[in-house]
Structure formats: C-alpha cells, structure tokens
Image (cartoon, coloured by chain):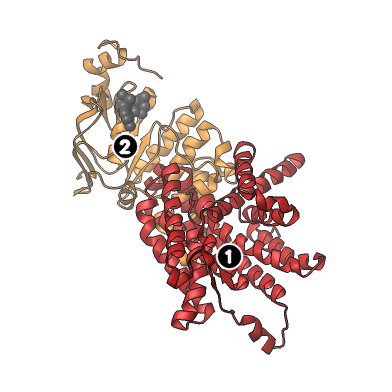
Chain colours: A red, B orange
Amino acid sequence: MKMTPKTATLLVLAALIALTPFFFPSGYYYRVGALLFVNGIAVTGMVILTGYAGQISLGHAGFAGIGAYACALAPVHWGLHPALAVILGAAISAILAFLVGRPILRLKGYYLGVATLGLGILVAMVLNNERQLTGGPDGMAVPELGLRALLKGWGLTLSNGEFWYFFCGLVLLVGAWLALNLYASPTGRALRALHGSEVAARTVGIDVARLKLQAFVISAVYASVSGSLLALQNKFVTPDVAGFMHSIEMVTMAVLGGVGSVLGAIFGAGILTLLPQVLTVFAEYEQMVLGLVMVLVMIFLREGLLPSVLRKFRGKDE
Amino acid sequence: MSDLLSIEGLGITFGGLKAVHDVSFRVRPGEIVSVIGPNGAGKTTLFNMISGVYRPGAGRVVLEGDDVTGMEPHLLARRGMSRTFQNLQIFPSMTALENAVTGYHLQERGPVLADLLGLPGARARARRAEEGARALLARVGLERAAERAAGNLSYGSLKRLEIARALALEPKVLLLDEPAAGCNAVETEEIDHLIAEVAASGVAILLVEHDMKMVMRISNHIVVLDHGEKIAEGDPATVSRNPAVIAAYLGVEEGQDHAHG
Ligand SMILES: Nc1ncnc2c1ncn2[C@@H]1O[C@H](COP(=O)(O)OP(=O)(O)OP(=O)(O)O)[C@@H](O)[C@H]1O
Ligand SMILES: [Mg+2]
C-alpha cells in the first residue's frame, strides 16, 4: 500500500523527535530541541498563511507576544491556570487576527507586508510601554506550567529539559497533523486555489476574503501557542518575543525550508535554530545572516531548501 | 421559455475608452448565444462585467429575474454562473485533478474546524469532490493527466481543464471565453460536441469564439460587437449576411484589425 504524504511526513517527524535524543552529547540539547519545536510550530502556521494561501505577514511575532504574555499575566492577575492561559492567549490572538485581518487582507504584496509589520510593532510597543503590567523591556516572570510535576505524580519522571523537549515535540506533531489535514481538505484546496489565481477562485464560488481571514486567524493561533510555550519553558518573557526580528525569523525559517510544505518549513526552522548553536558568531550577526539567507533563497531556491533538494534527488531516478 | 440571463444596456469605460457601450441581449436555458467581434471589440470585458469581475459602469445584469449587477463573482457562482477565461486562469501548482476539484467548492465546502481536524465528514466531502472531478476530467478527455501539475500541461489541455472546472459548479449559465483557442481541429470538434451536450442539458451558454465555423455551427443566436457596441444580432445565417458585420470583419471601418481564425 502506498503511504500518503501526510502519513509519511508525520512518521518522519515523529521518528526525528523520538530518536534524536539518543545522539545528544549533553542534556543541554533538549533545550535546543524544544526551541526548535517552538519555532516549528510558529512556522507551520506560516505554511498555512503563506504557503497555502499565498499571504505574507511580517508581524506574526505580535501574536507570539500575546500568547507569551497571556501565560505571564493571566495566572498572576486572574489566577488562571497556565494551561488555560495558553488557550486564553490563543483566543485573544484569534480575535485580534479576525478583527484586524479583514481590512488588512484586502491589501496585496508589499502593502500587506507593511500593514502586518505595523500590527506586530504595535503589539511590541504596548508590551514595552505598559510597564506596571508587563515590566516593560525588562520582562517578567512566567509561572510553572505544572504538567511535569503532574507526570511525576503518575510515575513519569522527566528532567526539565526532557519534559519541554517532548512536550513541544508533541504539540508540533499535533500542529503538523492539523496543517496536513487542512492541505487536502476543501478549505485547504480553496486556500491554495486563491493563491494560484484569485479571480479564478472567486468565479468558482470561493469567498476569497473569508478564506484569507480564516488562514490568518489559524496562523495567528499557531504563533500564539508557540509564544506561550516559549514563555512557559523559559519561565520568563520579554517584549522581544513580539519584536520585529522574531517576525522576520518566522518568515525566513519558513521560506528557507520551503513554505509550501510543512516538513520543509520545519526543516528551515531547524537550520536557523541550530545555526546559532553551532556558530556562536551567528548570534552577533543574526540580522545580517537572516537577511542574506532570505536574499539567497529568493534568488536561487524559490521553493525553499527541502523541496529543491528533493527535486534534485527525484530528478535523477525519473 | 423565459430568459435566464438578460443583459440590459451594459457599458463600461476605461480612462475615456468606451470598452463596452449599451449592449443588450438575452439568453434562454439550453440556448447557445455567441458574442463575436474583432480583437478589442469588448467581448472579454463584457464577460468580466457579467461575471462580476468588473463592476459595470452602466446597465443591468438580470439573472433569473434578479438584478445581479456588480455582484461579487463568488455570489454569482452560488446563483449558478460559471465561466472560463481567455487568458487561462488555472491554479498552476495544483494537479489537474485538484484544479477540477476546486469547482466543487460550493457543493463540498464545510466548517474549517472539521477540515483542520480531518473529521470523517471533511474527508468524505474531499472524496466526493475528487470523484466528481475525475468524472469531469474524463468527460473533457483529461483523465490521464489527473495527477500531473497543471502548470506542466499543454495550452489545449488547460483550456479543457478550465471547462471541466467550470462544469463542476453545475451552472445554469456558462460563459466560455475562446474555449477552442490554441486547440487543434480534433480538440476543437470535441469541445464543440461538449458545448452542444451541455446546452442540451438545459444550461444557457454564452460563447466568445474566433473560430467562425464553430460559431456558425453551434450557435442559436449571435451578438456582434465592434468597438464596444452591438452592431448586429440574430441567427447565424442572418448575421453572416449582415453588411455591417462583414465590414467590421474585413476591417473596412477605420483600419480596424483584421479578423482572425
Ligand atoms: N482593465 C482594463 N483596463 C483598461 N482597458 C481595458 C481593460 N480591459 C480591457 N480594456 C480595453 O477594452 C477594450 C476591449 O478589450 P477586450 O479584452 O474586452 O476585447 P476582446 O473583444 O475580448 O478582444 P480579443 O478578441 O482580443 O480577446 C480594449 O481596447 C482593451 O484594451
Ligand atoms: Mg477577449
């Protein structure tokens, strides 16, 4: 029996998540892995927005910021359990994306880029300026999720690093599964259709404005959850999570690996998460490297790294 | 029988150019009405206004008794209007099958949450659309191209793919903008048969085509445009004898482009 691309992608992903820890030289790498997965979640959202629907956003870190600060604020101020705070953050992000999305998504190309950029900057500014609430640029502490202690009670003892590695890996798997379900569904096909030709999509009855908005809201939820998980594992959050650089990082990761495919985009997230670990100079020149990567990919590998490489391999046996 | 589609004094100008001016005609169910005219006569612009791609500057489009002038294309699609494009509007990165599947959007769309979760209902909807699309591809002779990326298909194949996609909507009115352009004689004849078959099932067809033999053969009624205006109208025999039509086509007036095909 032939395996569907969806099953294959999920198996590859699950195998990578489960097996790579055997090769970790030290416990520190669990942390790097967890960071990779957190980025992978945000980037999977970009695949839906940019890869499927063809819409760009340079402000999705704003939603990551909302997710992150929901986990910092809601438990302290309203006594909400951090797990529920993740959901609250996702809901706020979804509502904001819904409200802002309709006017913004009428724009195309650069204009959409600039408008989303503004949205991201706005969120970052609020987080920076509301000092009494958010601690401003100094950031604030985030309470413990508490799931690790719960697991321990059930007899499953994990180190902090191990817990976040496997937990974020699991969330990434779920996120990838949802995105892959969407791909071949009527909604996913409509999204990809409007990407290909808006006028043709409209004439087959696709409500283009509505579908773009759905993709925007879904991807905002991905970014929000990613931000929440980042804050919870760091137990600390600063407005940088909502910053412009973080937005650019998301887009670059997705585009580098191949924004058209879930696995490709996660692969891109992997490269750009690991690079600073391997090359410490990267941290200093991060902005330059991101810019360079973006330019090179746009010129030489329009589809992204993974699809281009796969095509090379397939090309040989055809 | 009453009119399915009625075009009443439709017009639009682009920066001073009257691309279409005061054009009126009617289409009944099962009828094939052709719109002909030299290059730049305004045929495609007329289609764009009827299908809601352009908002008309003047006049009305009446579909089944309702004024649908300037209505969004996706809402017109719900009311049974479907079309193809002269300058191919396919979804290049999708397979031929998926392109045809999109034509089932209105019939098989569902809650986005169900689609995300891959619920059995969502999968059943996707499957039904695929089955329908496969049958349509077979009907236009593209069954063997189903899994190929649409971007890699020949021009003639893409023309037929667009027809398959448009038919998936099970339209009441079908607008075909040069469906046989770039097709060889055999393909043209197949398209010819297909159009006649669709019309026979009661669909009103509005056709723009430069292949005059095809137009004369299958049209019930012909509307002739020149410089955006209707210069003649009638059954094929009447229209082909009309001096104004002959003049427009031979370029007697103001050195207009010669007719082609
Ligand atoms: N969006 C637009 N903006 C400006 N001018 C336009 C636009 N669309 C069409 N026109 C002009 O309107 C006129 C009619 O064009 P149209 O494409 O409708 O002609 P046509 O009859 O379909 O010609 P052909 O046989 O070459 O397809 C032309 O002069 C064209 O340049
Ligand atoms: Mg035309």
Mark 2: secondary structure? helix
What residue would you read off at disc 1? Answer: A175
Numbered circle sitting on residue B48: 2
Label 2 and label 1: CA atoms lie apart by: 40 Å
Residue at disc 2, CB closer than 8 Å to ligand 1: yes
Decide: is A88 above or below A268.
Answer: below
Q: Is residue B23 visible?
A: yes
The one nearer the camera, B19 or B28, is B19
Decide: is A273 above or below B25.
Answer: below
Chain identity of mark 2: B
Q: Quadrant of the N terminus of chain B?
A: top left
Numbered circle sitting on residue A22: none
Q: Position of residue B169 (x, y in %)?
A: 39, 50
The one nearer the camera, B109 or B165, is B109
Task: Tell me what residue is drawn at x 32 percent, y 39 percent.
Answer: B205
- Asked which quadrant contains residue A142, the reply is bottom right
Mark 1: secondary structure? helix
Q: What is the three-letter code of the residue carrying label 1? A: Gly
Task: Tell me what residue is drawn at x 59 percent, y 52 percent.
Answer: A254
The one nearer the camera, A259 or B167, is A259
In this rendering, position of residue B247 left or right of residue A281: left
